[in-house]
Amino acid sequence: MQCWSCGKVKGKRPCPASHAALRLPEASTDGRDEKICSKCCGTKRRVEIACPSDCPYLHGEHDPKWESAEQQSEQTRFFSRFSGLEEAELPFLVFVHHLLFQSGPALEAVDDRALLHVVRTVSDTLDTRAKGIVYEHQSPRMDLQPAVQWLTSALTQRDQIPIAPKLTDKKAQAVLTRLADAVAAHLDAGEERPYLELARKVFAPLLAGAPELNLPEPPSSSGGLIVPP
């Protein structure tokens, strides 16, 4: 059965929102949960689709019951994209993903291309800071600027987050560069599952029991370039 939302690929997940107002004209209306593809589920939830709060896919509570070999292959392919990082940078990679998973409205609805844009823009800010210039790069996309500002604020004020690994701006920027490369590779591979959805599953064992982050408020924008003495 085709995905009830896009009608282009096979639907794999039972979707309790399939008999809501937004649906394909040719879809049946017998009240049963029709199936949705993981891409539509990941990118349209609570944006174009009125998801009920008890949907198990909404908060990652479902268990797809991957076959062990398939899961291991997926994890190996995922982490191979970060193979060039130094050992000291790996905890920061986990920390950055922990931030992304707790981003709430700032990033939960963006697609992979938008996520790539956000990460690259924040990476530019850290690169500038590593050179001794405090300047916050802005996104030309107004719809993504709140996400850019949120992640920039969290990472430039990471010293206020007790569990944040200690890392210089230069090395933190190297982690973000590799993250951007990983998201780009995920896009190029045409993966059906959105990057953050896959990453949430892969990082779940590492973040089990991790505390929620008390993130600092975004700083007020000075609108200027500050060069420290």
Image (tube, rainbow, N blue to C red):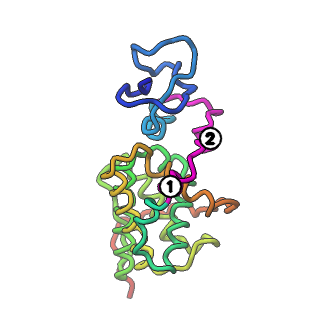
* Residue 135, numbered circle: none
Magenta stretch: helix, strand or loop mostly: loop
Q: How many marks?
A: 2
* Residue 18 higher or lower than 134, as above or below: above
Residue labelled with disc 1: 199
- Please give the name of the residue rendered at 48% of the width and 58% of the height, measured from the top-left corner: 150
- Please give the name of the residue rendered at 49% of the width and 64% of the height, measured from the top-left corner: 153
Q: Magenta span covers which residues?
A: 49-75
Spot occupied by residue 49 in the image (x, y as percentages of width and height): 49, 29
Q: In which quadrant of the rendered image does the N terminus lie?
A: top left
- Please give the name of the residue rendered at 52% of the width and 72% of the height, measured from the top-left corner: 92
* Residue 222 higher or lower than 140, as above or below: below
228 on left or right of 92: left
Type of amino acid at the residue the image marks with label 1: Ala
- The secondary element bearing badge 2 is classed as loop
* Residue 185 higher or lower than 2, as above or below: below
Q: In which quadrant of the rendered image does the C terminus lie?
A: bottom left
Spot occupied by residue 11 in the image (x, y as percentages of width and height): 45, 30
Cα gap from disc 1 to disc 2, whole angstroms: 15 Å
Spot occupied by residue 128 in the image (x, y as percentages of width and height): 34, 75
Q: Is 175 in front, or is 153?
A: 175
Instruction: First in sequence, mark 1 or 2: give its number.
Output: 2
Residue labelled with disc 2: 62
